[in-house]
Image: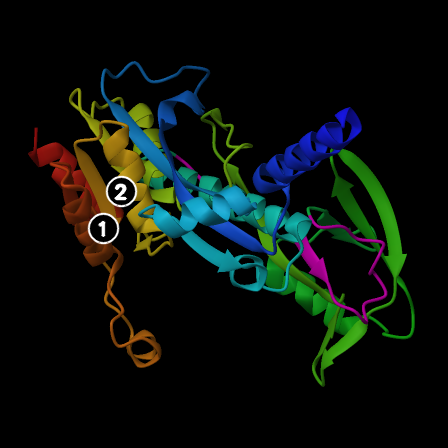
Amino acid sequence: MKTKKFVVLLSLLALVVAFFACPLPYYVEYPGAAKNVADYVKVDGKTSQAKGKLMLVYVNMMQATPFMLLKGWITPFYDIETKSESLGTNTIKEYDAMEQYYMQDAVNQAQYVALNLAHQPVTEKFYGLGVITTTKNSDFKGKLQPGDLITKLDGKSYPTLETFMQALKQKDITKPVTLTVLRQKKTLQITGKLQKINSKQNGLGITMMQQVQIQTPKKIEANMQDIGGPSAGLMLTLQLYEQLAQKDLTKGRKIAGTGTIAQDGHVGDIGGIDKKVVASAKSGATVFFAPNNPVSKAQKKADPAALTNYQEAKRAASKIKTNMKIVPVRNIQDALKYLENND
């Protein structure tokens, strides 16, 4: 009898563990948190002394367990997606590498825009190609890894992506090339053959993102290692500009927001903005910047009910009944104008 009770107890324990820990082929996205950008940024070795906060906002994503799947079904602002919907054709490692490259690009663009706004000298230099994936037929498959940074081709560096691609084009496809690769602070030499991308171009058989270095006399540190993706670009730019120009943009307020940033100051759309509104409201933000770019014809055709980021944010704010003001922005000047003209 004791043995049967023990087996039943063990079985129940296994079911409980499986309910909370067994991974399923689904992912759950849900509100994350709003973080003070000043905690991540230093200019000339100094952090911001402003009383208010400029806050970046992130969305959490995790592989579903039975518990999280159930919670996702019944909890507002939790979205359940299949693996392909969340990751596309990427592995987790490839997805993480892509998110880190997006974040690094956001940091670079934010520095460039903020330095220009503050009338500080700045130039941008092509640094290399960030590896995200290798194709099935690539001779570099198994040699290159997601997150690798290709800095040289046959021992030579190039000033732009265009000149790097032109050099590839001129290589003899029958002969191997050697790539200088930076991997987790180690420099490697990796050799492989090129492949024809089309009749006019040779390629490495990889998907990649170009990486640049911002060159300026100002010493800027932006440690964003724990946060991926490009959506913090707007708030990073505002934080850097506030410190570079020595202005108090917040005036004691908690300002949250989201959106990518381009070199011309344009603020781009992002995903999961409803969840970011929820996270910002919970963090006590009184203002939330939301991209307000028109819905394209292609988007409308695919989804007649498609909304702008701003409209999505307004709808989420209404659902949770927050007094947080949702402010539409299309460029960095829209955000600066609001901060400077409103208390």
> In x, y percent, where is residue 169?
74, 73
> Against 309, is 251 above or below?
above
Mark carried by residue 277? 2
Label 2 environment density (alpha carbons within 10 Å; few <14, some 14–19, many ≥20)? many
The 10 Å Cα crowd at callout 1, few under 14, some 14 to 19, many 20 or more, is many
Label 2 element class = helix
Range shown magenta: 121-146
- The disc labelled 1 sits on which kind of residue? Ala
Q: Residue at x 21, y 40 (%)?
A: 288
Provide residue 147's location: percent of width, then percent of height: 68, 46
Image-quadrant location for residue 1: top right
Q: Position of residue 183 (x, y in %)?
A: 76, 40
| Image point (32%, 42%), residue name | 276
Q: Is residue 229 left or right of residue 201?
A: left
Q: Is residue 204 magenta?
A: no
Residue 125 showing in the rendered view: no
Q: Residue at x 70, y 59 (%)?
A: 133
Residue 342: x and y in percent read 7, 33
Is label 1 in a helix, a strand or a loop? Answer: helix
The quadrant holding residue 167 is bottom right
Three-letter code, disc 2: Val
* Residue that label 1 marks: 313
